[in-house]
Structure formats: structure tokens, C-alpha cells
Image (cartoon, rainbow, N blue to C red):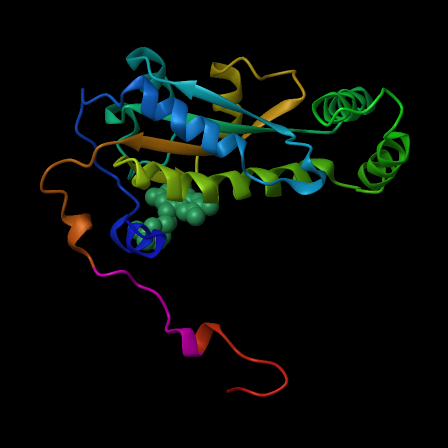
Amino acid sequence: MMIYDILSSRYATKHYEKGKKIPDEDIRYVLESMNLSASALGLQPYRFIVIDDDETKEKLAEYSFHGIDVADASHLIVIASMKSVPDGYIERFIERTEKLRGFERGDLQELEDLTKKIVHSIDDQFTWTQKQAYLVMGVLHIVAPERGIDMTPMEVFDREAYDRILGLEGTNYGSVLVGVLGYRKEGDPDQKLAKTRFPLSEIVSHFPKNI
Ligand SMILES: Cc1cc2nc3c(=O)[nH]c(=O)nc-3n(C[C@H](O)[C@H](O)[C@H](O)COP(=O)(O)O)c2cc1C
């Protein structure tokens, strides 16, 4: 299917078929694809936390956006971003780049220095790392429905409660976004709703003159 058709037919699914599990290989495909998302400087300042046990889903449901049947979904993927990017992490990233690209340690010193300089110049690093999480969510929007999985992104949830339940409290990571994944409930009326989008004529303009 063309990506345009996937985007046209997917929708933010609120009601899931309880007990219908996404196969492990499909979850793996989704995670590998999310891991290919671009991120600023390539740093991937985030982690993906996969939840599929009913007890945790039920606990998290209490602190989730109430219109989404989180407990009925097959899997939740929480994207948690770094609150700040430590120098040691940048060093590991450069080391890995050198190794994977066949360089000696130290060959990419200039890149390491530049990366640190850019990161140090960012006042609010958590805001910056959260932007990277939103990009990953864009990838998830495409690869989940490509694999026949329904999903909805969720940014309205109690982050503190999620962090507490997921053991992130006191760590350098904070939950930012949740991908709620599963299979749409048969007869879910939302799937029949027309997409509400403004026409391109309102969204796009050409500079210096409209064509
Ligand atoms: C970054 C992001 C966060 C969202 N957070 C929520 C949310 O917390 N609760 C919710 O019900 N829908 C959420 N949505 C779903 C949007 O409301 C939905 O994508 C939008 O209305 C367009 O509908 P469609 O995805 O069905 O085309 C979110 C979407 C995005 C892209």
C-alpha cells in the first residue's frame, strides 16, 4: 500500500479489541522502525518502554487520557526522553559511530567537540529531547498501520504517575508520549468519520508568490 493510502485509512483509535495481541514479530518491526527515526545530531536521547501486561496497563489507564481505552489495547509504547544529555553519553555515541564506520578512537574528535558544544548551548535540553520523541511518534504513525496495527498517540496523561509506575522517578528520563497500539474494536464508529483537515490551499503557500 502507498504511504498516502496508509495515512488516509489510519485513525486515532480509541476503542480496542480486548485480548487481541499484536504478534511479537510485528512489535519488533515497529520498534526497529522507530529506532531508524532521525534525531537531532543522531543522538537518540530517548528510550522506548514497551508494556503489554494487563496489570501495568490497568494501572496506567487510570492516569491516561480518559477517551482512550488504554487497558484494552495490546501494547503501550512509552517514549521517555532524557532530561539532559550527559557528556558521557555523547562520548559513547561518538565511540559507537567510530566503531560502526571503521574509524579509530579519536578520529571523530572534532565531531565530538562540536556535538558537545551544540548540546551545551541548549538551555532547555528536556524540551529539545522531547522534540526528538515527537519525530519518533511520526514514524510510529506510519509503520504501525503499515503492519495492520491500529494506534493512537497520547500526550495527555499524568507524566508523574507514569514515571512513578514505570520506575523513571529520580532518573534522567521522563515520559513524553505514549503510543497506544492494538486492533480497532469492531464497529468502532470513529473509523467511519471523515478526516477533518484544512485544504492544501489554506495550509500551503508559495513564496514569493502563490502559483
Ligand atoms: C502528538 C499527538 C498527541 C496526541 N495526543 C492525544 C491524546 O492525548 N488523546 C487523544 O485522544 N488523542 C490524541 N492525539 C490524536 C489526535 O487528536 C488525532 O490524531 C487528530 O485528531 C487527528 O485525527 P486522526 O489521527 O484520526 O486523523 C494526539 C495526536 C498527536 C499527533
Residue 168 percent coordinates (x, y): 57, 17
* Vertical arrangement, residue 8 with respect to residue 62, above or below: below
Magenta span: predominant SS is: loop
Question: Which residue is at the front of the view, 87 or 101?
Answer: 101
Picture quarter containing residue 42? top right
Q: Residue drawn 47% across and 15% down?
A: 165
Q: Residue drawn 67% across and 21% down?
A: 172
Residue 81 percent coordinates (x, y): 61, 30
Q: Residue drawn 56% across and 80% down?
A: 206
Residue 169 located within the stretch drawn in magenta: no
Q: Is residue 181 left or right of residue 106?
A: left
Q: Give the range drawn in magenta.
A: 194-201
Q: Residue drawn 42% across and 26% down?
A: 77
* Vertical arrangement, residue 136 with respect to residue 160, above or below: below
* Vertical arrangement, residue 82 with respect to residue 131, above or below: above
Picture quarter containing residue 19? top left
In the displayed image of the protein, which residue is found farthest to the front? 102
Can residue 155 be spotted in the picture?
no
Residue 145 percent coordinates (x, y): 30, 41
Q: Is residue 118 left or right of residue 60?
A: right
In the displayed image of the protein, which residue is found farthest to the left? 187
Question: Which residue is at the front of the view, 204 or 159?
Answer: 204
Picture quarter containing residue 97? top right
Residue 107 percent coordinates (x, y): 88, 27
Can residue 144 be spotted in the picture?
yes
